[in-house]
């Protein structure tokens, strides 16, 4: 069950990042466009602060894929596992309140996508089986904002000297 929710979280974060990057500011240089769009996302800020090597690797991959003419969904599907891996590792060290909030919003998001279609929900939960979806195109801005903030809050709470230690 954790893998499903982790995948869900990852898809959301990556989809939001790519959607902002690809669709909202194409007139600027790709590097500046990507950087400004991603910097507006709370979870991306956490990755930038706490995992600079991963941050740069993802930026480089996104730029290379866009330059190669890959479609948005291919970019999402390529970088999603990296963010998912980071979030899964952080989830284990997050305090209970952060985990509960994170999971609650994940369930809300899954239910909202289920209302769109069964196929979209399946693709959202299992992107490696049938290709993912871009939740930014399916969900309202409020839910996406709450989702991205919950991701960032959980990741921050699970890092550093005050993180939860599993005993």
Image (cartoon, grey):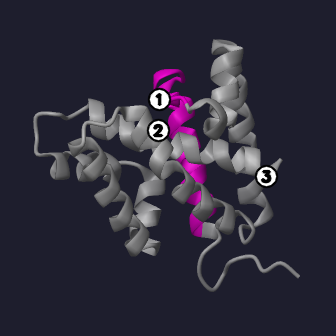
- Can you identify the residue that label 3 sits on? 2
Q: Main secondary structure of the magenta part?
A: helix
Image quarter of residue 165: bottom right
Q: Which residues are magenta?
A: 133-156
Residue projecting furthest to the right: 167
Separation of marks 3 and 1 at Cα, in angstroms: 22 Å
Residue 75 lies, with reference to residue 135, above or below; the image says below
Image quarter of residue 53: bottom left
Per the image, is 151 magenta? yes
Residue 120, position in %: x, y? 63, 21
Q: Mark 3 falls on what kind of element? A: helix
Separation of marks 2 and 3 at Cα, in angstroms: 19 Å
Left/right placement of residue 114 relative to residue 78 reads right
Dot placed on the residue nearer the N-terminal end, 2 or 3: 3
Q: Nearer the viewer, residue 110 or 79?
A: 79
Separation of marks 1 and 2 at Cα, in angstroms: 7 Å
Q: In the image, what residue occupies the spot 66% across and 13% down?
A: 117
Q: Nearer the viewer, residue 148 or 123?
A: 123
Per the image, is 37 magenta? no
- Can you identify the residue that label 2 sits on? 15
- Can you identify the residue that label 1 sits on? 136
Q: In the image, what residue occupies the spot 26% across and 51% down?
A: 64
Dot placed on the residue nearer the N-terminal end, 1 or 2: 2
Residue 39, position in %: x, y? 32, 53
Residue 27 lies, with reference to residue 55, above or below; the image says above
Image quarter of residue 132: top right
Quadrant, the C terminus: bottom right
């Amino acid at each position: 069950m954790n893998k499903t929710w982790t995948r869900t979280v990852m898809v959301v974060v990556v989809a939001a990042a790519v959607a902002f990057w690809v669709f909202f500011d194409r007139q600027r240089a790709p590097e500046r466009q990507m950087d400004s769009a991603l910097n507006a996302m709370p979870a991306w800020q956490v990755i930038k602060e706490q995992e600079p090597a991963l941050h740069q690797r993802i930026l480089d991959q996104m730029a290379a894929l866009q330059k190669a003419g890959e479609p948005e969904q291919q970019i999402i599907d390529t970088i999603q596992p990296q963010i998912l891996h980071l979030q899964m590792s952080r989830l284990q060290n997050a305090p209970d309140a952060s985990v509960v909030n994170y999971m609650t919003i994940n369930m809300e998001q899954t239910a909202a996508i289920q209302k769109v279609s069964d196929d979209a929900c399946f693709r959202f939960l299992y992107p490696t089986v049938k290709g993912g979806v871009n939740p930014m195109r399916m969900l309202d801005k409020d839910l996406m904002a709450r989702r991205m903030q919950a991701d960032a809050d959980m990741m921050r709470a699970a890092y550093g000297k005050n993180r939860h230690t599993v005993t």
